[in-house]
Each structure stands twice: as C-alpha cells, then as structure tokens.
Image: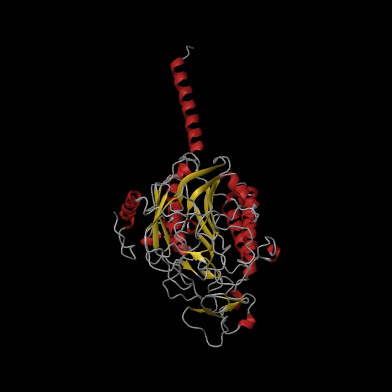
Amino acid sequence: MKRNFKFEFLLCLMVLLTINSCKTDKEKGEVSDDKAGPNIVIIYADDLGYGELGVYGATELKTPNLDRLANGGLRFTNGYASSATCTPSRYALLTGVYPWRNKRAKILPGTAPLIIDTAQLTLPKMLKKKGYHTGIVGKWHLGLGDGNVDWNKRIAPGPNEVGFDYSNILAATQDRVPTVYIENGHVVNLDPNDPIEVDYQKNFKGEPTGLDNPEMLKMKWHHGHNNSIVNGIPRIGFMKGGAAALWVDEDMADYFLNEAQQYVRAQKEQPFFLYYALQQPHVPRTPHPRFVGSSGMGPRGDVIVEADWVVGELIKTLETEGVLDNTLIIFSSDNGPVLNDGYYDDAVEKVGNHQPKGPLRGGKYSLFEAGTRVPFFTYWKGTIKPGTSDALVSQLDIFSSIASLVGSDLEGEDSKDILNTFLGKSDMGRDELVLEATSRTAYRKGDWVMIPPYDGPAKNMQVDIELGNDKEYQLYDLKNDIGQEINLAHSNPDKLEEMIKAFEQIRGEGYKKVEQLELK
C-alpha cells in the first residue's frame, strides 16, 4: 500500500500543536475547557503588619510556616489591602469594588445588617458559576440579616446568601458580641431554653460589665471594651443568654482550623474555594495554652506564632489529601498593625526590637503606608516560581484575576485582571490605586503617593498611631522615601497637581474635608 506522507505529516503536526497548546495552558496557569480549575484558598490575617513575618524582615518573631510558603511562592513588596480597617477591606476582597463606593462599608457593630447586597456580584458567586464549591471559615464582619436579627432562629441574609455554600463564622470580631459561632446561619450549640439577646445601646438588667465589675476580669480593658463580660474578657456591646453556645477564646484558632481542614477533606473531589479568615492578631489576643510564652512578646506575639502554626497545619492537610499541587493559595492581611487596640496585654511593653510595620509609617487606621501595605504572597506548587515582585497589586485585583484564571468573563467594578502578575508571568501590576482609612482616601500612582488635606488629629492617641491628617497636601516619593519622612508637596508642585487631577478623576471631589490649597 502506498503511504500518504502528506497525511502523516499533517497528523504529526496536529499532535505536536495539541501537546504544545496543553503545555502553554499549564505554563500560564490557565484552565482548559476539559479540566476543572485549581482549588483556591485565600488566607486572610487580621491586623498583621508589613514587618511581622521573617520573609518581610522580622528578626525577633519566628514564622517558619508562613516564611516557607512565601519563599516557595511569589512575595509582593507593594501589596495593598483596600483599607486601613477590617470591614472595608473584606468588602473589597469579596466584591472587587472600592469600599468608599459603599457608604455602609465601615467598621461594623455585631448587630449591623449585611452590607453586601444579595443581588451583588461576589467572588464566591462567580466561582459557583464555574462549578466551584465555596466555603468561608473564620471572621466575617460584613453584617448579618436586616439589622433586626433574632439570634435564636436562622440568621439571614449572610455569607450563604452572597455566594458561600458553607459558612462557619464569628459574626463580627472577637472583641464584639455576640460571642458565638454561626454555621450556615445557625448559632452553634444554641440551647432554645437559653435564648440569646444582643444590644449595642443598653445593658440587660442584672448583667455584669467590664466597667462596673472589674473584679470579674482576667483581661483589663484600656479603652472602648468595657461592656458585657464573656470568659472574663470585657467586650464591645451587651449580650445575655446563650451560655452553651459561647465560644472559648483560647480554643478559637483550633476550632476554625478544624473546620477548614474538614472543609478540604469534604470537598477535595471537586474544585473548591476556601476563604479562611483568621482572627489573629486582632484583640483580644488569647493564644491557646500551647502557645503562651512562645514569642517572648506577650499575647500579641504568641497569637502570631499560633497563626503561623494553623497555616502550617492547613498546608499539611492540603498535602495529605493530595490537592496541594492543584491549589492556588493567596495570603494577606486586612490592614496594618496596631499594638494597644483596647486591652492591657503587654503588646507595647514587650514588643522589644520587633517592628510590626517594618520600615513604613503609620499603622491600622492610618493613611500612611503601614495602614494598607501588608504582607501579600501567592503560592501554587509547580506553577508559580519562587521569587519577589515589586509590582503594585491590590486585594481588589484578586476578583478579576481569579475570574480570568477560571475562564469567567465577570469582573469586579474596580478590580484589575493581573493574573499573570500574581502567577509571576509578568512584572506589571496596576498603575494606580486609591487607598482608604476610616472614610478618608489617598492616592498612589507609580512610586508616588498623595494624601489630600484632612481635618482631625494628627495621631490617634489611644492607639498611638499617626493618622495621616494634615491641613496641607502631602506628597511622597516612596522609591526614595519608603518611611514617608519628606513631604515634597511644596517642592514638586507639578507632580502634586498631576496626582490630584488623576485622583479626582477616580474619586470625584466628595473627599474634600478642608479647603484645598491653591496650586501655583
């Protein structure tokens, strides 16, 4: 039989092109049509500063598990949270929308209504459309219900109504009531004969408080935390009942770790998205006895060591269950650090040579860099090559970048698709970014950052952090002045005018708090 060399050549060429195409998809981290995308895990710390991890320069605090993960992935030196406080950053992370666009995206009480509209596009909703199972374990703090929650019935709307198939959360923060876990809208271990009541305006008759009953406290309050006492710790807000459902603070890290591990084991046969929201090192800092004294820095250092351990244990679970190689992990923090944030816990006295904010200025609540520039790294074994990137990236960009990864054409309003940057395939991040701190906003573009004039104190004296307020414009060249020591607003008026104009094109003029200086 006569051989058809032309046909054989074309057949070989098609095979080679197919192999090369598959290889290209794998190299890019793209999802092919006939194969599910990678699992996605976002690990979100609470109040962890830029300088807290060894891989970011910490020398006094040991974080071997997080360092190993960061060194095995891509570490960003210019990675930002969307806000210098928790609720706004969490809103931006899940929606891809600047928090200042939502007037309700502020630090919320435990009784606040849900601030994400149930019709709004969210990261878990987008992933569900692509076949993912979605879960959240840990801190929520985005509101629940409609503002009139009956904690003794199913609580809705909440995480399950904005895209999560599974949720096991604390409603707000560890220092706020209600101090109970909520699984898929139901308070865990609730005794119907001991109903929960919560109020942020007035106490319940006969219930002790931190202000009136200091003899009952195992942790003393410094400011703002003197209402209901739970487990010897005074909280923000008043609560009565629910004794069987109350969490044990020292067990919280173990509780949420176990839930995260169980989630991985249950969903490992299908693509899953896990949002693992740690409570450390937010106040009250209550390390499990295993970690007490582990840092030499008191409870704040100890809970960072504890957080490092739980991350290490979760990575072990991913590996044991055989899914680590097919899991994209993103680690970051909701805002910068604070030492004394409401309790006497030796955070200030025992910090020693540790620099929670690293070389940056400010901290939590601040418009200076330490308020929003945070640890930020991506890890995907075998796909992301270890390295460091100076690209400007924001947690806002996680939404559209993950959408690109899984082949979705949905995007967040302010989110940029910088998937190749997160995967280490490009050095280009976003060009500009609006930063927020307690309703005030600033602007970064390239190596420059501009802070508009704002009324208000220069420093929050209770937490001893510079806020960034000034009656004049501030302009800093971060490439040469990462500590923001030299204000160049007067010496570089052309750059200042350029920054203001670009900022106002995004932000509008509603941000103005004092009369702007005349630019000349």
Residue at position x 69%, y 61% in the image: 294
Name the residue nearer the viewer: 470 or 122.
470
Residue at position x 44%, y 19% in the image: 7
Q: Give left or right: position of 341 versus 89.
A: right
Q: How is the image coloured?
A: secondary structure
Name the residue nearer the viewer: 85 or 348.
348
Q: Would residue 317 be visible to someone looking at this image? A: no
Location of the C terminus (image quadrant): bottom left
- Please state the horizontal and vertical placement of residue 450, each as a whole percent of the image: 39, 54
Residue at position x 31%, y 55% in the image: 504
Q: Give left or right: position of 520 versus 358.
A: left
Q: Would residue 208 be visible to someone looking at this image? A: yes
Name the residue nearer the viewer: 201 or 300.
300
- Please state the horizontal and vertical placement of residue 462, each as a whole percent of the image: 52, 71
Number of dots carrying numbers:
0
Relative to 66, say whether 257 is above or below: below
Name the residue at the front extreme: 491
Q: Give left or right: position of 277 versus 476.
A: right
State the image quarter where residue 60 is shown.
Answer: bottom right
- Please state the horizontal and vertical placement of residue 459, each as a whole percent of the image: 47, 67
- Please state the horizontal and vertical placement of residue 246, each as a whole percent of the image: 59, 74
Residue at position x 64%, y 68% in the image: 250
State the image quarter where residue 98 is shown.
Answer: bottom left
